[in-house]
Image: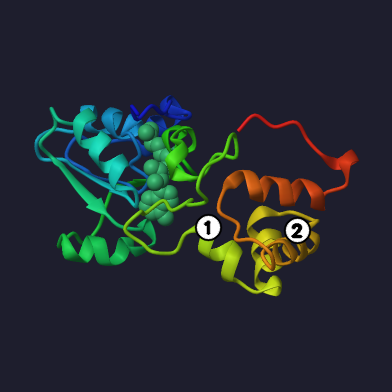
Amino acid sequence: MEFKHQPVMLKECIQGLQIKSHGIYVDGTLGGAGHSKSIAEKLSKKGLLIGIDRDKEALKAAKETLKDFENVKYVHDNHDNIKHILEDLEIEGVDGILLDLGVSSYQLDERNRGFSYLGENILDMRMDQTQSLTAKKVVNEYSEKKLAKIIYEYGEERFSKRIARNICEYRKTKTIETTKQLVEIIEKSIPRAKHERTSC
Ligand SMILES: C[S@@+](CC[C@H](N)C(=O)[O-])C[C@H]1O[C@@H](n2cnc3c(N)ncnc32)[C@H](O)[C@@H]1O
């Protein structure tokens, strides 16, 4: 599948970065390089763009988008490690950092990635597919308490305890393999009046 992603608030991001042609810029969520392409276009040969992404598919797509630009370094890592990434590149300071947080449209649309809950897909949800922890492992192996905490804190879901309880009940008889199974458990856990129509 083609890596398509519409860069969000592109004009505002580029304005905010106030790009100097000789500067060093980090895109910590490179994705399909929608934002990065605009940054690279403003850099001279002395400037540098460092593109970081956890997803190797994103890096592959970004390299294609940025193939005409030489002054780009690609890093497969978590942007949380930016200090070490810059140390490894022997860079002491940068002129700007962009973070466009979240998932890309590609990750949602590509069913094999297991992010979308439309249809029946294997529960994966790894941004970095070189890592071993999948959503399937989390929902089938984590304790009820830990699941409730994750769903409450990261999903901001007030029915987190009920969902966690129902996940643990369900997995007593059957492994949760797909996004569809998980959706069914979640729907059962939330009062019908609270169900929302969603499009993802
Ligand atoms: C919303 S997309 C970015 C799209 C990009 N700005 C563009 O215009 O194409 C977010 C990207 O950040 C990556 N990502 C999310 N969390 C990350 C992290 N902690 N470290 C590095 N990359 C991350 C995802 O893999 C995804 O490719």
Element at label 1: helix
Where in the figure is residue 3, as x and y percent of width and height?
Answer: 35, 30
For the residues labelled 1 and 2, say whether their Cβ atoms are less than 8 Å apart: no
Q: Earlier in the sequence, mark 1 or mark 2?
A: 1
Q: Disc 1 residue type?
A: Ala
Look at the numbered disc 1 and say if its residue's Cβ is closer than 8 Å to ligand 1.
Answer: no
Image point (33%, 46%), residue name: 96
Q: Quadrant of the C terminus?
A: top right
Image point (60%, 61%), residue name: 175
Where in the figure is residue 73, as x and y percent of width and height?
Answer: 17, 47
Number of numbered discs: 2
Where in the figure is residue 9, as x and y percent of width and height?
Answer: 48, 28
Quadrant of the image occupied by residue 18: top left
Q: Quadrant of the N terminus?
A: top left
Q: Image check: 102 left or right of 140?
A: left
Where in the figure is residue 81, as x and y percent of width and height?
Answer: 34, 64
Image point (78%, 35%), residue name: 196
Q: Image check: 143 left or right of 48?
A: right
Image point (44%, 44%), residue name: 113
Q: Which residue is mark 1?
A: 135
